[in-house]
Amino acid sequence: MSQNCLLCQSHDGRLFFEDNGYELRRCSGCGLLYVPDPPSSDQLQDMYDREQWVGADGEVTRDDTAYR
């Protein structure tokens, strides 16, 4: 379900970034960056439970140097 801007409810957002099937949009009304079709709670849980993110000790271990 596509959402309007959570701050000003504008439906006019320009694409700012896209990755892994998700869009990050900048609201043309107020400038807020938002995800119009955010993943569900179950999808988020699956994304962040992977070994690449969480080590055996339960700490976040992702090396984000590739994203800089």
Image: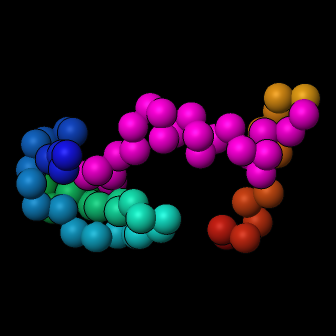
Q: Quadrant of residue 56?
A: top right
Across the whole image, how many numbered discs are drawn on residues?
0
| Colour scheme in use | rainbow
Span colored in magenta: 33-56
Residue at the right extreme, as displayed: 57
Quadrant location of the C terminus? bottom right
Q: Is residue 24 above or below residue 47?
A: below
Q: Is residue 6 left or right of residue 52?
A: left
- Residue 34 colored magenta? yes
Residue 29 as seen in the image, left or right of residue 41: left
> Residue 22: x and y, percent?
39, 60
Q: Residue at x 66, y 68 (%)?
A: 67
- Determine if the magenta segment contains residue 21: no
Q: Residue at x 10, y 42 (%)?
A: 9
Residue 63 in sight: yes
Residue 21 spot, x, y in % from top left: 41, 64
Identify the residue at horizontal 82%, vertical 29% (top origin). Answer: 58
User: Residue 18 placed where, x, y %?
Assistant: 41, 69
Residue at image location 22% in from the left, 69% down from the top:
14
Whether residue 30 appears in this view of the structure is no
Seen from the viewer's position, the closer of residues 66 and 32 is 66
Residue 15, given in percent of the width and then of the height, sits at: 28, 70
